[in-house]
Image: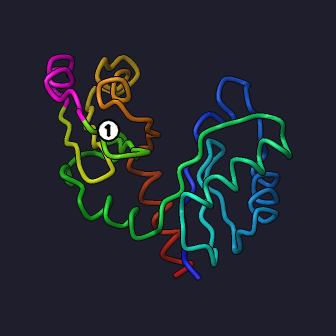
Amino acid sequence: MKTYVALFRGINVGGKNMLAMKDLVATLEDAGCQDVATYIQSGNAVFRSDEADASLLSGRIKAAIEERHGFELRVLVLASEEMERAVRSNPFPEAEPRTLHVYFLAASPERPDLEGLEGIKGDRERFVLGDGVFYLHAPDGIGRSKLAANVEKLLGVPATARNWRTVRKVMEMADQRG
């Protein structure tokens, strides 16, 4: 049995796609996930499954949410090893956790516009494109960051971002499951 992390995009944001975490847990269990735990209301879950293919799990979970709750959203399912690699590969270990964000990519960018990203980054912002992840250190916050607002467009792939505290907590939860 493998441990997985599911990162949901677009639930409980701005009053749309409202989904209580207890309902998310029940939906994941109905989709065959076991030992399910969630972290904060914005959509982070850790679970175990006999399924070896993360993309099949993602599709199954997405379909279960649509069927049970009536809305569609993106879900990225990662094996715990992928999350662990993202943590180990952090290029900004000195960054204050609230200023570091990790964008988990749905696919490897074929033609990322790194020059475009470089051209719009703030004076104190730094970024690194890694294996399946994009790290953004934004010491002045991401609320007004042009770079943060354009990551998906300039990388050319869907992504979902988490701050470093959330990444660490979710990784801790995955470690507890083995």
**Residue 122 located within the stretch drawn in magenta:** yes
Classify mark 1: residues with Cα within 10 Å, few (<14), some (14-19) or many (20+). Answer: some
Q: Is residue 166 left or right of residue 58?
A: left
Q: Position of residue 108 (x, y in %)?
A: 32, 46
The kind of residue on which mark 1 rests is: Thr
Indicate left or right for 77 with 129 as reference.
Answer: right
- As displayed, is residue 149 above or below residue 25? above
Q: Residue visible at 78% across and 41% down?
A: 66
Quarter assignment of residue 116: top left
| Residue 139 on the magenta span | no
Q: What stretch of residues is rendered in magenta? A: 111-125
Residue position marked by numbered label 1 in the rendering: 99
Q: Nearer the viewer, residue 143 or 71?
A: 71
- Report x, y in % for residue 6: 57, 56
Which residue is depicted at the point 78% across and 65% down?
A: 29
Pick the quarter of the image with the N terminus.
bottom right
- In this rendering, is residue 33 above or below 129? below
